[in-house]
Image (tube, rainbow, N blue to C red):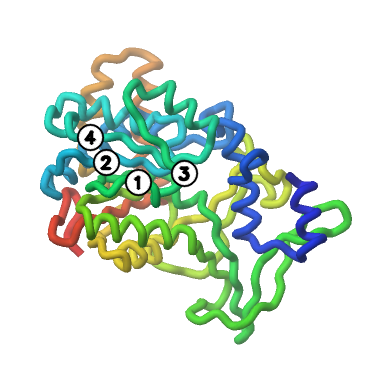
């Protein structure tokens, strides 16, 4: 991958950060997500579904509440964007299996480009599944979608406004090494003073989903780390073996993410026609969905270190010093079909 990037930069000039992210993460054969399972202790990071089954169970209960709020359409698409190993979807389906009408109406669709992860999902989920490379090929049916740690992995530009001038952060070549650099570009309206991270890909997907919900009915849940209000500042990071590394140190061998701009994402969903419900922290969402009671019930069946580890994992999801505050939850729904518990109407 490094050789490819160096050759492209020498041929075409410095590579914008969003192009670099897209290439490193999604190149058809060399991309980070194309040839590995990055999750868990043996990987580079761990997501909430891998920490505790309660996360997926409570998301599943929310999906049922959302489905009922939007009129209990049958059939409907249960869509997950970036479903990882399939753990979250497996927990959702298990938690909702006894809800007969919901289970009979559901059609599972996964938006996933990685062959390795598609196989993991196939192994995990013992049911009929339809895979998609993008949301654009989803059938024209009502849908409930879930996106957990999906938008943070989408490419973002880094644009800098300083003293009236505008610059773009790029990847360049210095000797045999990749380095970060900036180059002047024409004025970009609406930039804040400082470094702005803008994901046009995220906004396009949100607008498309918002339009589908407006036209066909449905709702969706976005869970990710990020900030509720648009703000200047750099959040781009690379993770390898659960440790932060340099963004250009290990191209295609480390995970690249940016914090999600929930204000920009909400505007994109609304531009498509969906109603955006008041966002919450992950801690507030899971607690209001009943995490404490569910954890106590499951823990009662466990003993010793297993019980301790289980309760530690559940607490990690909502602890303000862990995932509780950093992660935010945004819900969207058809304008005529909201609010959906525990979210308030806009």
Which residue reaches farthest right?
Answer: 175
**Which residue bears the numbered disc 4?**
106
The number of callouts visible is: 4
Mark 2–mark 1 contact, CB under 8 Å? yes
Distance Cα–Cα, label 3 vs label 1: 10 Å
Within-10-Å neighbours for mark 3: few <14, some 14–19, many 20+: some
- Residue corresponding to mark 3: 133
Disc 2 residue crowd, few under 14, some 14–19, many 20+, Cα 10 Å: many
Residue at which label 1 appears = 138
Which residue appears at 63% of the width and 58% of the height?
A: 19
Identify the image quadrant of the C terminus. bottom left
Q: Mark 1: which secondary structure?
A: loop
Location of residue 248 in the rendering, given as x and y in whole percent from the top left corner: 71, 51
Q: Sequence-wise, which precedes: disc 3 or disc 1?
A: 3
Q: Which residue is mark 2?
A: 77
Left or right of residue 57, residue 28 in this image:
right
The numbered mark, 2 or 1, whose residue comes first in the sequence reads: 2
In percent of width and height, residue 178 lies at: 78, 54
Q: Residue at x 80, y 54 (%)?
A: 7
Residue 313 is at least partly visible in this image: no
Q: Residues within 10 Å of mark 4 (few under 14, many from 20)?
A: some
């Amino acid at each position: 991958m490094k050789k490819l990037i160096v050759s492209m930069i020498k041929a075409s000039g410095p590579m914008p950060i969003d192009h670099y992210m897209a290439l490193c993460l999604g190149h058809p054969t060399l991309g980070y997500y194309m040839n590995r399972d990055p999750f868990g202790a043996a990987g580079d990071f761990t997501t909430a579904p891998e920490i505790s089954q309660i996360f997926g169970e409570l998301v599943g209960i929310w999906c049922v509440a959302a489905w009922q709020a939007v009129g209990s359409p049958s059939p409907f698409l249960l869509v997950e964007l970036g479903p990882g190993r399939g753990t979250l979807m497996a927990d959702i389906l298990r938690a909702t299996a006894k809800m007969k009408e919901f289970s009979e109406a559901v059609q599972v669709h996964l938006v996933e480009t990685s062959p390795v992860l598609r196989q993991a999902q196939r192994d995990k989920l013992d049911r009929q599944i339809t895979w998609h490379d993008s949301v654009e090929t989803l059938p024209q049916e009502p849908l409930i979608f879930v996106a957990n740690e999906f938008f943070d992995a989408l490419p973002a530009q880094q644009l800098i406004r300083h003293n009236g001038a505008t610059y773009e952060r790029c990847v360049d070549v210095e000797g045999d090494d990749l380095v970060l650099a900036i180059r002047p570009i024409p004025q970009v309206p609406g930039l804040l003073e400082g470094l702005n991270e803008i994901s046009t890909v995220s906004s396009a997907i949100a607008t498309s989903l918002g339009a589908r919900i407006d036209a066909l009915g449905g709702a969706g849940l976005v869970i990710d780390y990020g900030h509720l209000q648009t703000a200047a500042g750099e959040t781009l990071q690379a993770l390898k073996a659960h440790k932060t590394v340099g963004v250009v140190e290990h191209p295609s061998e480390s995970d690249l993410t940016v914090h999600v701009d929930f204000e920009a994402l909400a505007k994109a969903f609304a531009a498509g026609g969906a109603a955006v419900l008041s966002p919450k922290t992950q801690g507030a969402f899971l607690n209001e969905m009943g995490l404490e009671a569910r954890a106590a019930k499951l823990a009662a069946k466990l003993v010793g270190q297993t019980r301790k580890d289980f309760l530690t994992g559940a607490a990690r999801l909502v602890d303000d010093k862990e995932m509780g505050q950093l992660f935010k939850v945004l819900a969207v729904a058809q304008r005529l079909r909201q609010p959906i518990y525990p979210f308030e109407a806009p």
